[in-house]
Image (cartoon, helix red, strand yellow):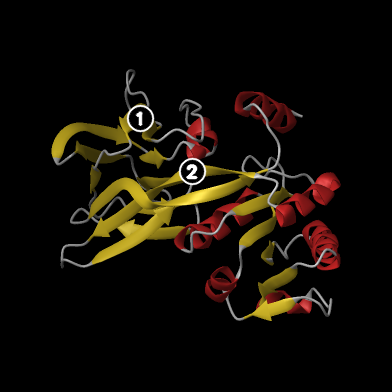
Amino acid sequence: MKIALIVNTGKQAAISCAEKIANQFLQNGAEVYMPKKCGAYFDNAGIMFVSNHFELFDVCDLAVTVGGDGTIIHSAKHAAKYDKPMIGVNVGRLGFAAEVEPEHIEDLNRLLSGDYELQCRMLLSVSVKHKDGSTEDFLAVNDATLARGHMSRIIDISISLDHSPITTYRADGVLFSTPTGSTAYALSAGGPVISPQMECVLLTPICPHSLISRSVLFESDALLTAKVQVNDDTKAILSIDGEKNIEITADDVVIIKKSDETLKLITLYKRNFYQLLNEKLKERKA
């Protein structure tokens, strides 16, 4: 079995944990692949290095990430595009999306025998259609945030469903979230918790200038579009999973819908999502 090992090399704890995982896999007959840039941190002769993440996910059978939720989210987009299952080892703070804690990495040996289950997670396809007809396309694991720029004034955002106008928010912004992303920024913005295996699109206004604006759930086949009213005094930014930021003008149209691609997350344990959520939130409080 060929296993991609993706590590947050900015964390020494993640590097140390990944070394143990790599040795464990190699001792049990698996092939371990890592991005070439990790070569400076890992000198195990058994590890094979490839040029980039595209080659990494092309060659592997499954992927293991070692870090926090950010490491999982970044890798998840490659995993979805190449239809490869993945699992996360939590060496971060909360690790909502991670399955394994560092003290239980021996459980990863179950990957080699196929002793695991898969959860399919819905993703969002986010497109920006510009005035000149060009389009930029993105994939969101957690959310797409359309919000005012730094120190900008409150903005007006018009929302349409299946090309029919439905409402306009005067707010700091709006969040379009997957069920997986409902426990991320959307939770902090007052949105509901959604079971990650459901399929729907969650729209949550950010600091709306209203007493009645609430989160709205749309069916998974909904086609949502958003336009902002901005001028010289205001700016709007579209952020995809907090990683990629695009400035949005009044002439741009942001299109949000369910992606044709899905994320396959490996599960080793039978756990109640809501019990796990409570445990994670208690850790945050502590």
Report the residue at 16% width, 66% height from top.
133
Q: Position of residue 55 (x, y in %)?
A: 55, 76
In-image side of 233 versus 75 (left or right): left
Real-space CA distance between mark 2 and mark 1, rounded to the nearest whole angstrom: 29 Å
In-image side of 264 versus 163 (left or right): right
Circle on res. 121: 2
Report the residue at 61% width, 29% height from top.
273
Circle on res. 89: none
Q: Which is nearer the N-term, disc 2 or disc 1?
A: 2
Give the residue at the far left of this rendering: 164
Q: Is residue 154 visible?
A: yes
Quadrant location of the C terminus? top right
Q: Position of residue 186 (x, y in %)?
A: 47, 35
Toward which corner of the image does residue 169 lie, by quadrant?
Answer: top left
Q: Is residue 236 visible?
A: no
Give the residue at the far top of this rendering: 211
- Front position in the image: 256 or 62: 62
Vertical placement of 248 versus 270: above or below? below
Q: Which residue is mark 1?
A: 208
Vertical placement of 160 versus 34: above or below? above
In-image side of 59 versus 170 (left or right): right
Q: SS of the residue at dot 1?
A: loop
Q: Categorize mark 1 by other alpha carbons within 10 Å: few (<14), some (14-19), many (20+).
A: some
Q: Position of residue 216 (x, y in %)?
A: 34, 27
Query: What's the amino acid at mark 1?
Result: Pro
Query: What's the amino acid at mark 2?
Result: Arg
User: Which numbered mark, 2 or 1, is in the foreground of this view?
Assistant: 2
Vertical placement of 107 versus 204: above or below? below
Quadrant location of the N terminus? bottom right
Give the residue at the far front of this rendering: 113
Q: SS of the residue at dot 2?
A: strand
Report the residue at 35% width, 28% height from top.
217
